[in-house]
């Protein structure tokens, strides 16, 4: 039987083109009843942006202690990278942020706002529609390191295949 969990453990290039929030909701539902399955995907907006220093220390601890394999929990970190959009480079040095929450469309939009230092919702919406930026989420879970890249389509965030 093919399930969302099978899709989750595929390589990034094997993801089918689909809406990020649909995938995150399906992952959340799929693992809801199994305490042994953890996922960095979900619909929760809780989490916090963490500093470059803390990001470095968390990466070091994760790979030193577990070899890169870990079960995703509340204290884990997702690395968010925002590449240039339509030739416009992010205002932050390397376009990377640490995030302690779940991966979903809300976080993708928030990351673009952080990277390009856009404060107002209206300005962010205009930027998204005009430049159609992408965001890469890098995480480590019980299957080891993984990443997923999404791109704004004009109305929602789609998983790049």
Image (cartoon, grey):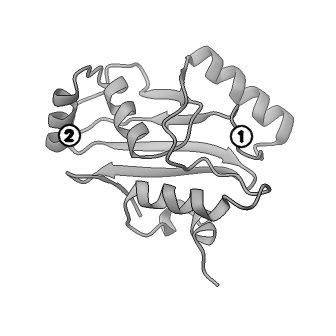
Q: Is residue 78 left or right of residue 160?
A: right
Q: What is the x, y in percent for residue 118? A: 26, 22
Q: Nearer the viewer, residue 28 or 81?
A: 28
Report the residue marked by disc 2.
Answer: 86
Q: Is residue 60 left or right of residue 41?
A: right
Quadrant of the rendered image containing residue 78: top right
In which quadrant of the rendered image does the N terminus lie? bottom right
Is 150 above or below relative to 120? below
Look at 24% across and 54% down and name the residue there. 153
Horizontally, is 8 left or right of 149 in the view?
Answer: right
First in residue order: circle 1 vs circle 2: 1
Element under disc 2 = loop
**Viewer-nearest residue: 17 or 41:** 41
Instruction: Left or right? Give the position of 65 relative to 28.
Output: right
Image position of 1 with respect to 52: above or below: below
Marks 1 and 2: which is nearer the front? 1
Q: What is the total number of numbered labels drawn onto the structure image?
A: 2
Mark 1, residues whose alpha carbon is within 10 Å: few (<14), some, or many (≥20)? some
Contact check, label 1 and label 2, Cβ < 8 Å: no
Q: Where the C terminus falls, by quadrant?
A: bottom left
**Marker disc for residue 73:** 1
- Identify the secondary structure beneath mark 1: loop
x and y, in percent, of residue 20 in the image: 41, 55
How far across and down, in percent of the image, does residue 9 sit?
Answer: 63, 64
């Amino acid at each position: 039987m093919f399930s969302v969990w099978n899709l989750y453990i595929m390589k990034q290039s094997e993801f089918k083109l689909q809406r990020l929030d649909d995938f995150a909701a399906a992952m959340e539902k799929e693992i809801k009843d199994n305490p042994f399955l953890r996922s960095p995907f979900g619909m929760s907006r809780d989490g916090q942006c963490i500093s470059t220093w803390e990001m470095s220390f968390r990466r070091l601890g994760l790979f030193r202690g577990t070899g890169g394999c870990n079960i995703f929990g509340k204290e884990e970190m997702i690395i968010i990278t925002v590449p240039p959009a339509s030739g416009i480079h992010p205002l932050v040095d390397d376009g990377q942020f640490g995030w302690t929450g779940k991966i979903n469309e809300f976080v993708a939009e928030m990351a673009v706002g952080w990277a390009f230092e856009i404060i107002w919702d209206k300005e962010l919406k205009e930027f998204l529609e005009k430049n159609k930026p992408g965001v890469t989420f890098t995480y480590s879970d019980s299957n080891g390191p993984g990443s997923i890249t999404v791109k704004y389509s004009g109305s929602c965030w789609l998983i790049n295949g």
